[in-house]
Image (cartoon, rainbow, N blue to C red):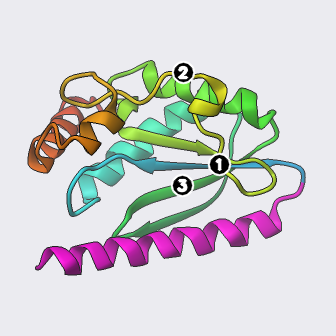
Amino acid sequence: MKNKDLLDKVLIGKQGVYKKKQDIFRRLQDGFLVIISNVMPGFPKKNGKVKQFMESVIAKVVLELPLEKKDFLENDAGLFYFFESRLDPLLLKRRAVHVESSSKFYRLLDIDCYHGTGFPISRISLNLPQRKCLICNNDAAQCLLNFQHPTHALRASALKLIDEFKF
């Protein structure tokens, strides 16, 4: 499959995530939206083992963050778990970043917290540390922008972590 075709599949998947997010925002009562997705460089973004890993890890994360599951979406962009939380979204984002950083396995999670307005809360806005690269532990965004590591090496690092995880 050509790179353009793969990119198109991921972009269509991202559109599906956006539509699901908008639908859930319309149904939220007093809570705030949290989306937990998998960090999987390259393509495909998911397989049976990745899904098993995500469900096992999320079961543990839900014990650390006050979340109520609302929905799930699986498409070519990855695995997306939608939750509602009644915790203040700024505090929730701080706790989510702590959780993401607390285990090498949790680094394969992307926990996005949203204001009631629908806008995501960024790490930068709260002066929180940026996500670390799976290979070198430097700022992941800088590694990505500078093409520091090939996609296949990042993917291999992610898959190695999943293989090390005890289900």
**For mark 2, what is the residue?**
98
Seen as rendered, the residue at the extreme right is 30
In the figure, is residue 3 to the left or right of 91?
left
Q: Which residues are magenta?
A: 1-29
Q: Position of residue 55 (x, y in %)?
A: 43, 46
Residue drawn at (51%, 31%), measured in percent from left and top? 60
Quadrant for the N terminus in the image: bottom left
Q: Position of residue 91 (x, y in %)?
A: 73, 27
Dot 3: element:
strand
Of badges 3 and 1, nearer the viewer stands 1
Q: Is residue 6 magenta?
A: yes
Q: Earlier in the sequence, mark 3 or mark 1?
A: 3
Query: Which one is nearer the viewer's eye here, 34 or 70?
Result: 34
Residue drawn at (32%, 23%), measured in percent from left and top? 104
**For mark 1, what is the residue?**
120
**For mark 3, what is the residue?**
81
Dot 1: element:
loop
Q: CA distance from mark 2 to mark 3?
A: 19 Å
How many numbered marks have been drawn onto this rendered protein structure? Answer: 3
Query: Does residue 150 lie above or below 118 as drawn?
Result: above
In the figure, is residue 148 to the left or right of 88?
left
Q: Residues within 10 Å of mark 3 (few under 14, many from 20)?
A: many
Quadrant for the C terminus in the image: top left
Query: Does residue 132 lie above or below 32 as drawn?
Result: above
User: What amino acid is labelled 2 in the image?
Assistant: His
